[in-house]
Image (tube, rainbow, N blue to C red):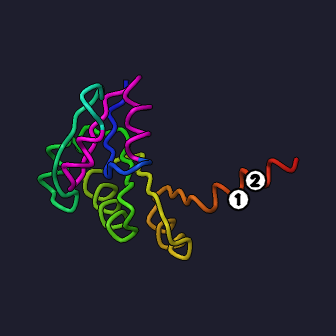
């Protein structure tokens, strides 16, 4: 069983949290209490109200034990900063970031971070539909 931290409880974060919490220990961190409440009472994980830019929040989420961290805040700059901190300070192996601005892709890659871009994914899936 893996220990996973998800930062950002928007649509992607919420769906990922539900999916991963079926088999793994999941902690979801968000600055919005309303977003965390959208997980409902049936969510089989931990909800943490706080700012991921705050080291204390990350440590309360169990970042030191995390096998993977997903940064899905919707803000590329926050995702990059927190991703760098998690990778460098805590040496977390799996650091996956959502990136909206594809032009920032190179910056994220240089840091050794795994990036996911919705537009790129959609294009890849649609291209495979032609095969």
Q: Nearer the viewer, residue 57 or 11?
A: 11
Q: How many marks?
A: 2
Q: Nearer the viewer, residue 7 or 63?
A: 7
Q: Which residue is the extreme one toward the left?
A: 56
Name the residue carrying label 2. Answer: 126
In the rendering, which numbered label is found on residue 24? none
Rendered view: 66 above or below 52 = above
Neighbourhood count class around disc 1 (C-alpha, 10 Å): few under 14, some 14–19, many 20 upward: few
Name the residue carrying label 1. Answer: 123
The residue tagged with tag 2: helix, strand or loop? Answer: helix
Q: Quadrant of residue 27?
A: top left
Q: Is residue 118 magenta?
A: no
Check if mark 2's residue and mark 1's residue have beta carbons within 8 Å. Answer: yes
Q: Nearer the viewer, residue 95 or 101?
A: 101
Where residue 17 appears, as percent x and y from the top left, is: 37, 37
- What is the span of residues highlighted in magenta in the rendered image? 13-38
Q: Residue at x 41, y 51 (%)?
A: 95
Q: Residue at x 66, y 55 (%)?
A: 122
Quarter of the picture holding the N terminus = top left
Where residue 23 appears, as percent x and y from the top left, is: 41, 23
Q: Is residue 31 magenta?
A: yes
């Amino acid at each position: 069983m893996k220990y996973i931290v998800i930062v950002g409880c928007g649509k992607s974060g919420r769906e990922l949290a539900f999916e991963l919490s079926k088999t793994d220990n999941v902690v979801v961190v968000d600055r919005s209490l309303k977003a965390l409440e959208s997980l409902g009472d049936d969510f089989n994980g931990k909800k943490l109200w706080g700012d991921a830019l705050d080291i204390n929040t990350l440590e309360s989420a169990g970042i030191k034990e995390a096998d993977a961290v997903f940064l899905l805040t919707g803000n590329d700059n926050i995702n990059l900063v927190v991703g760098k901190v998690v990778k460098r300070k805590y040496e977390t192996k799996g650091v996956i970031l959502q990136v909206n601005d594809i032009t920032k892709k190179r910056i994220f890659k240089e840091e050794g971070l795994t990036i996911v871009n919705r537009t790129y994914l959609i294009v890849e899936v649609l291209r495979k539909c032609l095969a």
